[in-house]
Amino acid sequence: METPVTFQCEGSTLMGILSTPDTPPRRGIVFVVADGPQYRAGVQRQFVTLARAMEQAGYAALRFDYRGMGDSEGVHRGFEHVDMDIKAAIDALLVHCSSIEEVVLWGECDSSAAVLFYAYKDKRIKGISIANPWIRTEEGRAKTIVKHYYLKRLFEKAFWNKLFSGQFRFKASLYSLWQNAMKIFRASSHSAPAQNMVSDVSDQNQPLPVRLAHGLKNFDGNVLLILSGNDWIAKEFKEVADASPVWRNLLSDQRLKRHEIADADHSFSKKSARSEMVRLNLEWLKSW
């Protein structure tokens, strides 16, 4: 059953859709929407698909619009400032489903970051499922472009056809490559220390990878990480994580399950990729 629900967050009324199974659920999932022009249905309605699959598996699922998004009141604050919105959604879930003993947060892209910023602060949360986490740094983006765009282009027939036909814009391409190379050079001189540390306290002045590592390290529940094989943001996450001893250690933790869906794009728009993403989430939920 799907039921519209409203709840309060610091004086603003938030809107959500609650999916509940026939039998009282012991576990509930709260979907955190990504930043930008999105709302509780998710891109290509993926939150709807996931929530209904979870409801059929016996879990409650709440997808909601945080302040300033979709049908919710208030001012849009961005993914770094939605702790109170997530807390209000969890409170509402427990009010409507008093049988719930465990809460799971689900996030994608920058809402994965929002989940990591919040989850360790709320002991009601026993699991987090994150997909293609947003871990953007200037150096990470530049490395991803150089490695996964420029090198890949050398093996594409279209590139060589363009080159030999005289349509290739040497000056613009070389300038772009030079800019990205310089970003890597400038950033690498001061990013190495940050890659080898986890902040003891949440510090807004720290680079995003350090702040996310702080959240993951301090969360003691189960974690599912899903990466898309055909997504720039996922590639950037892997580049940053592979270069960081701290992140390599966090991702090797036994409580974290990591999967990659090779043919998936950022929003799992292909039917096969979305079905696999749903299957991985349901298997993970059943495993603990």
Image (cartoon, grey):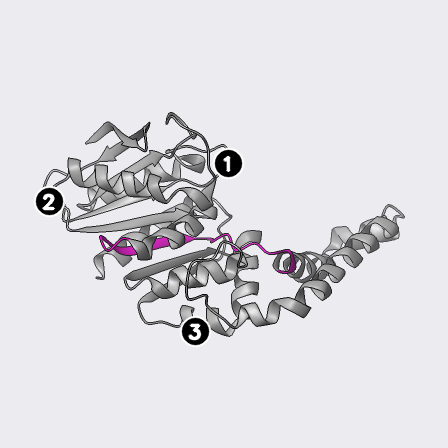
Rendering coords of residue 225 (x, y %): 39, 59
- Decide which of tag 3 and tag 1 comes sooner along the chain: 1
Q: Amino acid at mark 3?
A: Asn
| Residue at x-position 41% and y-position 56% | 226
Q: Measured along the vertical axis of the image, is residue 89 above or below residue 154?
A: above
Which of the pair 2/181 is nearer the observer? 181
Q: Residues within 10 Å of mark 3 (few under 14, many from 20)?
A: few
For residue 36, the mark is: 1
In the structure shown, which secondary structural element does the residue marked by tag 2 occupy? loop
Label ID, residue 157: none
Looking at the rendering, the stretch of residues picked out in magenta corresponds to 122-139
Report, in whole angstroms, how far the alpha carbon at label 3 lies from the one at label 1.
31 Å
Residues tagged 3 and 2 counted as in contact (Cβ below 8 A): no
Which type of secondary structure does the marked residue at label 3 adopt? Answer: helix
Q: Is residue 260 magenta?
A: no
Residue position marked by numbered label 3 in the rendering? 249
Quadrant location of the N terminus?
Answer: top left
